[in-house]
Image (cartoon, coloured by chain):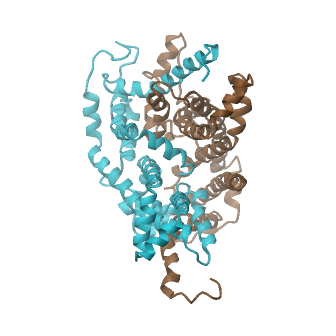
Chain colours: A brown, B cyan
Amino acid sequence: MSMNTPRRPLRSIAIPYLLVAPTLILVLMFNVLPAIRTVNDSLYKPARGLNSAGKPPQFVGVQNFQDLFDDSHYMGTRFTRSFRNTIIFALATVGIGVPLGLLLAILLNREQPLLGLWRFAVFYPSLLPLIGAASIWSFIFSDSIGLANAILKSVGHPGLNWLGDRNLVLASVVIVNIWKQAGYFMIFFLAGLQNIPRDLYEAAALDGADSLQQFAYLTLPLLRRTLLFVIVVSFIFAFQTVEQLQALGEGGPADSANLLLYLIFQNISERRNWGYVNAMTIILIGVVLTFTLSNFLLFERDEKDS
Amino acid sequence: MNKTTGILPRLATALKIALAVAFLIPLVFTILVSFRPEAEPVTKGSIFFGSEITLVNYQRALVIAPWSLHYLNSFLFVAGVLLVQLVTVTCAAYAFARLRFFGRDLLLMIILLQLMIPSGVLLVQNFRTINMLGLFDTRIALMIPYWGSAFGVLLLRQTFREIPIELDEAARIDGANLLQVIRHVYVSNAIPAYLAFALVSVSSHWNEFLWPFIITRSEEIRPLTVGLNKLIKTTDQGAFYGQLMAGTLIVITPLVILFVLFQRHFVESFARSGIR
């Protein structure tokens, strides 16, 4: 307020705060404060023993984190495997899913007969509940009657133990995730492609550029923003979408395909592990936060440029 | 674009068909297996229809979980989330778009923290909060973490800012109060943004599983995804895949129909939704 405006009545000063309050309180209650409490609780171990329910937790400093990175510790083994799996899962989803999404967008960008049908065919998986998608694939991967093995057997292969073989479960989970998300990534690329002026292509074609050259020198550079955005978003998603494990081997034998958030979920009712659960949540938040922040910085800056 | 019949366009068409078929196969076989006699390998009988077409799987799946109740619960869950969101989001978005007040940018920053620390990863602490509030196993517990939406605030703030301020001023000169201005100037000029937000909100909460699973115990309030989980766990013990596929279809069909009806809106909405 500048000096010469008349004093506003109290009521009108309060209005903006009243309008913002509901959202603000909810975000504080379910995002900000829990995050702070997670930091705090990750430094404690729940009291041990039979009648420990009412006893105060014991301060242990960064012991929980040390245990997590200690491969001989029971939780350390589980954490290390799940964390490594989560990274592999994210990299594989991004590395295969994002280029696939881009390919789908290029194939399904232009007007063509049955466009709606083609787009439906590749986009519908991203609408399904993750657990429904996983349930479908639990049949495809099933040992005896599954489709994947039926196909393998028809070409003379004895078939694979998709959800039981510890070297294979993670790959199976990655396949499901790519199938689920490629169509979703496609949507962003479609939006990006729509923003490229068509006359650029006509000019390039007049200059004698063939389709591949147009893709390499026009489409790809102009989609740079979208591409970055999709990569970051798909990384963030990879760390948060774990429900498929519920139907696809529950983390596999000996956590061979477990993912970080699912490990947290598995331990939520194990009171004695709450210190570890909080420490793992901190690590998870750290990763997600890094990616989201880089997303913000990258695109806030870009928006100011344009 | 160019009508030359080179190798590339034909390759593209072939690729398109191959990919579409690959993506559709799971859905097609889910449907086929749901009508096939239980535990019959796909190689037995006709590859598509098995030795006979049967409804037994559906009858069995219907018995395992009270699906109509789960449907109602899912509906109440997403509707309850969306209705409250529409109010909280509209109010906050208006304040951030058009009002000046001390601490505005700081408060917006705090709200945006939700995008960086999504409530979905804070399972333990939110579980404890709900218990402390005495809300465990209630419908409110399901919905309350989603009632505030930073994504919605961002989306509508942006939309509201593009509405000419003159409309706002004209309405006030005509004697409209704050709520009337918000309703008739802002809300009614931002319907496409609301539709986008609604589609994203509904489809993501309809699919929510971890939170509903943790925070509820009674079947009376559990949504479809948790019902499907029960079916999956039943199947684990005996490989009743026909029944599981029938149940999966019972759960996913409405969303697929919704998508077919609103395809264009879905595509546009999801394109705007970067972060849920």
Which one is nearer the viewer's eye here, A96 or A280? A96
Task: Tell me where residue B128 appears, x and y as whole percent.
Answer: 49, 64
Q: Residue at x 38, y 63 (%)?
A: B140
Tell me the quarter of the image containing the N terminus of chain B: top right
Residue B161, position in %: x, y?
55, 63
Q: Position of residue B120 (x, y in %)?
A: 52, 54
Q: Residue at x 64, y 40 (%)?
A: A90
> B42 or A187: which is nearer to us?
A187
Q: Image height check: is A169 above or below B86?
A: above
Task: Tell me: residue B216, above or below residue A181.
Answer: below
B232 left or right of B20 in image: left
Q: Residue B96: where, in percent of width, then height?
A: 56, 68
Q: Quadrant of residue B252?
A: top left
| Side (left or right) of A122 relative to B139 | right
Vertical position of residue B59 compared to residue A304: above or below: above
**In the image, B67: left or right of B3?**
left
Question: In the figure, residue B246 lies in which quadrant?
Answer: top left
| Of B199 and B65, the residue lying toward us | B199
Q: Going 53% across and 57% down the picture, which residue do you hit?
A: B155
Q: Going by the image, does B201 lie left or right of A281? A: left
